[in-house]
Image (tube, rainbow, N blue to C red):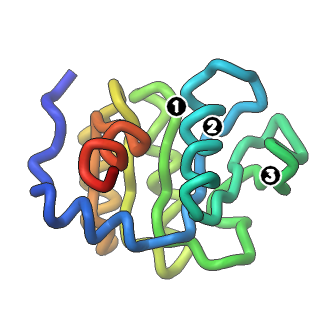
Amino acid sequence: MEEMDNTPDNRLKEIYKLKNIAVVGMSPTEGKPANYVPKYLIEKGYKVIPVNPVYDSVLGLKSYPKVSEIPDPVDIVDIFRKSEDIPPIAKDAVKKKGIKVFWMQLGIYNSEAKEIAERNGMEVVYNRCMLREHQRLLL
């Protein structure tokens, strides 16, 4: 596992001003990070959009099979998938215009996906938890 990205704290605080977050791999299972992290983000006022082809809805929100199929604006793609599964997600995300940040959760990093996202104008954050970073920087 590569170290976490070197995004400075002041930049991370700016990223948290973006409000529309597609959560890839969002889970309905209580106790899983892919469930309680998006729940936390919703409580903090973010618009969370589940992306999980297995479920029609997660936490009462319509779920989409892919990021590119979300009709609403997306600022951040937050990913809960195995590192080796990330490149197809990056390739799909670039089809959706307007995404600013490609965020791979704690323990997740894929250099190919990072390159795809950056080459298409997205900022990449990796090996960081959106909940922990939010609490560390903004609470």
Q: Do the residues bearing badges 2 and 3 touch, measured as CB atoms within 8 Å?
A: no
Residue topped by disc 2: 25
The percent coordinates of residue 122 (x first, y second) are: 32, 68
Quarter holding the N terminus? top left
Residue appearing at x 87%, y 49% in the figure: 60
- Amino acid on which disc 3 is placed: Ser
Q: Is residue 98 above or below residue 90?
A: below
> Element under label 2?
loop
The percent coordinates of residue 39 (x first, y second) are: 64, 43
Q: Is residue 112 visible?
A: no
Front residue (pair 13, 120) = 13
Q: Is residue 121 above or below residue 37?
A: below
Left or right of 87 in this view: 93? right
- Amino acid on which disc 2 is placed: Gly
Residue topped by disc 3: 63
The percent coordinates of residue 89 (x first, y second) are: 52, 48
Dot 2 or dot 3: first in sequence order is 2
Q: Do the residues bearing badges 1 and 2 touch, measured as CB atoms within 8 Å?
A: yes
Residue topped by disc 1: 81
Residue appearing at x 82%, y 54% in the figure: 61
